[in-house]
Amino acid sequence: MGVGGGRLRATGKCIYLMSVSEILIFDRYWTDVRFGLKKPVRNGSPVMMLGDNIYHRNETTGDWIQEDSHHSNPNGSTNITNLDRDTTSENVLVSSHFFYFGSAAPSVDLASINYTNGIGYSKKSFDDSEVTAFVRDIEKKTWRDRNVVIADPFDFGQAAKRVDQGTKRIS
């Protein structure tokens, strides 16, 4: 689950909910033909600009490559802050069972699963007993929207801009 924060004026709202169906390493995600359309095209449509298939390793040196994307510097060069943050794990989570609400994110009862929405708060896993009713409630209300992008991301109108996760600024 991804929840919104203060900058988006989405505190306590569920941006997405997913069940992980596959875990890939970045290099596999990069080369897998299923995810070719997720590679960013900076002179493309907003959807193409925001592709998230942006990291892979140089086959010779093993160094990370950050493709020209919304996470790189304005000139297309590597934004080290974003690279370091985004590659703290080698894993990419893939889902074939998800809800992506984006800017239409519904408010959810985070207290019911002992989740505190706040800067730097990260609870990676939950006991089944904590989330079963929570997830069932969301699925019951939105079952027709499974595996559909319900609304554009909050910052979709700024697709051509870049994000710096160190400063939390979009420019």
Image (cartoon, helix red, strand yellow):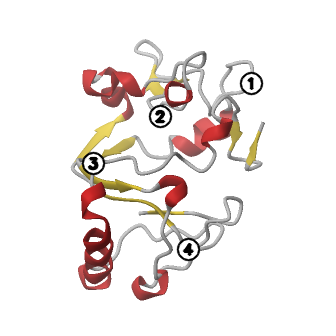
Per the image, the residue denoted by label 4 is 12
Residue 28 in the image: above or below residue 126: above
Q: Which amino acid lies under the numbered mark 2 shown in the image of this protein?
A: Asp
Q: CA distance from mark 3 to mark 1?
A: 30 Å
Q: CA distance from mark 3 to mark 4?
A: 23 Å
Task: From the viewer's side, name the closer residue of 136 and 18.
Answer: 136
Q: Which amino acid lies under the numbered mark 3 shown in the image of this protein?
A: Ser
Q: Which amino acid lies under the numbered mark 4 shown in the image of this protein?
A: Gly
Per the image, the residue denoted by label 3 is 95
Q: Residue at x 63, y 72 (%)?
A: 118
In the figure, is residue 27 to the left or right of 84?
left
Residue 126, horizontal then vertical, whole percent? 34, 76
Q: Earlier in the sequence, mark 2 or mark 3?
A: 2
Q: CA distance from mark 1 to mark 2?
A: 17 Å
Task: From the viewer's side, name the closer residue of 67 and 39.
Answer: 39
Q: Earlier in the sequence, mark 4 or mark 2?
A: 4
Crowding at label 2, few (<14), some or many (≥20) Cα neighbours within 10 Å? some
Q: CA distance from mark 2 to mark 3?
A: 14 Å
Residue 133 in the image: above or below residue 67: below
Tell me the SS state at disc 4: loop
In the figure, is residue 100 to the left or right of 23?
right
In the figure, is residue 40 to the left or right of 130?
right
Per the image, the residue denoted by label 1 is 74
Tell me the SS state at disc 3: loop
Frontmost of labels 4 and 2 is 4
Q: Quadrant of residue 18?
A: bottom left
Image quadrant holding the C terminus, namely: top right
Q: Residue at x 68, y 37 (%)?
A: 158
Residue 155 in the image: above or below residue 39: below
Tell me the SS state at disc 1: loop
Per the image, the residue denoted by label 2 is 52
